[in-house]
Amino acid sequence: MEGWLGPGIDYRMQGDGDLGDRMSQAFQSSFDKGTDAVVIIGTDCPELTAPLLEKAFQELHLHDLVLAAVDGGYYLIGLRRPVPQLFQAIA
């Protein structure tokens, strides 16, 4: 990821559990470190570009939640605060 998006971004490995657990842990871990805007992405989406990722962070200055989706599924979620219930019961 760093080779693609460059340095200066905090990259992290996924945690344990189902998809919802891993996403919730990723957000919580970042917010625990004082981050004020967090974006998680799917790594297998060709529609994801660096400009789109930059746009997601820009939109988080205006909104609490940012989503990007294609073909009925999402590949990017951005938050300005933890919302653990958003990730419950995701298989």
Image: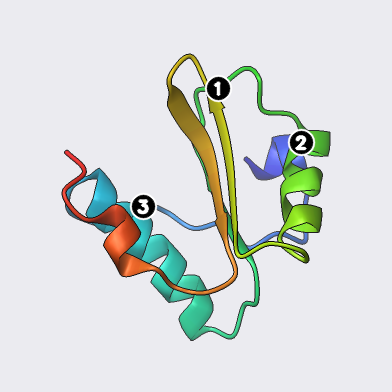
C-alpha distance separating marks 3 and 2: 22 Å
> Where residue 34 sits in the image (x, y, percent)?
59, 85
Q: Position of residue 6 (x, y in %)?
A: 78, 46
CA distance for labels 3 and 1: 17 Å
Q: Nearer the viewer, mark 3 or mark 2?
A: 2
Tell which circle, 3 or 1, labels the residue nearer the N-terminal end: 3
Q: Image quadrant of residue 65? A: bottom right
Please name the residue shown 64% across and 68% down the image. 37
* Residue type beneath disc 2: Leu
| Residue linked to disc 3 | 14
Residue 12 as seen in the image, left or right of residue 52: left
- The crowd level at tag 2 (other Cα within 10 Å; few <14, some 14-19, many 20+) is few
Q: Position of residue 30 (x, y in %)?
A: 51, 72
* Looking at the image, residue 32 lies above or below residue 74: below
Q: Name the N-terminal-most of marks 1 and 2.
A: 1
Which secondary structure lies at badge 3?
loop
Residue at the spot 41% in from the left edge and 73% down from the top edge: 28
Residue at figure coordinates x 29%, y 55% from the top left: 87
Q: Is residue 54 left or right of residue 10?
A: right
**Against 3, is 26 above or below?**
below
